[in-house]
Amino acid sequence: MNNRLRVLRAERKWSQAELGTRLGVSRQAVNAIETGKHDPSLTLAFRIARLFGHPLESIFEQTD
Amino acid sequence: MLYYRPASGGKALSLGTVRTLTAAALFAYPAGALIREFGSGVIAPIVGFALIVVALMSTAALMGSSIQRIVGEQVELLDEFELKLRNRAVGSAYKLLSLLILLAVIYAAIASDQQWWIPHTYGEFSGLFWGAFLYCALLPSVFLTWIVEPSDIVGDGPVE
């Protein structure tokens, strides 16, 4: 699954650690999601969408 | 919490350090125990004891590390990525531990017939107990150190 998390975070000039704090996860989790090593749970994905004020499908994109 | 000494998010050790410490602990302890049990001469007990001390010191250093935190911390204090890492590491460690237990049982079954060594004294059973405890505590960490990348653990990788 691809995502635009790194772009959205950069737009707000947040560090991975800062985003992690806002989402209630570790910096390592943010890094893993950004690099595609970890697909977030639905709960976390919705939390990310709500934090950035974007619909889920504009942040995450399913790849075949 | 059994195998983890809480230290506010885990002590930041590099991946290389953690790999070295886990390897030292898991090799030095059995090596030291075997040398103490079967070594001859005055130097063998000293070398054996020194290896066991190395293993225990390595274990003590690991107990508060961020890697050990992923293995031993309470579930509700880990995030979903850390839980995913833990599940992979514990699953692999379980398979290896199962194999070691089966081999130990087979050895014990054969050893009594073949007059091979089996523990008799309190000291020998104590050594086996603490060795088993050490392996139970550290095997998941060993797998974890080879699953993760430097950026996956506290103390390593770029902070952006």
Image (spheres, coloured by chain):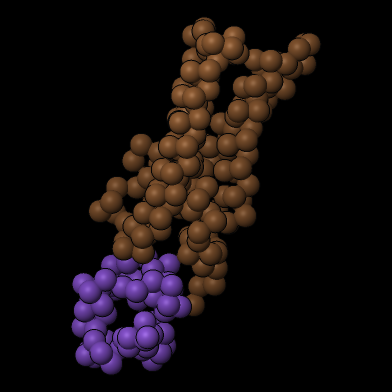
Q: Residue at x 55, y 68 (%)?
A: B157
In the displayed structure, A12 sits above or below A38; it is: below
A59 sits left or right of A55 in the view = right
Quarter-wise, where is residue A60 in the image?
Answer: bottom left
Indicate the chain coloured purple by its letter: A
The picture places residue B4, in percent across and down from the top left corner, at 40, 41
Q: Is residue B99 visible?
A: yes
The picture places residue B152, in percent across and down from the top left corner, at 48, 64
The picture places residue A12, in percent across and down from the top left corner, at 36, 88
Q: Residue at x 57, y 50 (%)?
A: B18
Farthest top residue in view: B121
A63 sits left or right of B48 in the view = left
- Quadrant location, the N terminus of chain B: top left
Q: Nearer the viewer, residue B99 or B24?
A: B99
Quarter-wise, where is residue B118 in the image?
Answer: top right
Q: Nearer the viewer, residue A11 or B25?
A: B25
Q: Which residue is drawn at 50% across and 61% down?
A: B148
Indicate the chain coloured brown by its letter: B
| Number of numbered tags placed on the structure image | 0
Q: Which residue is drawn at 72% across and 16% down?
A: B39
The picture places residue B22, in percent across and down from the top left corner, at 57, 43
Q: Can residue A9 be seen in this view?
A: no
In the displayed structure, A26 sits above or below A8; it is: above
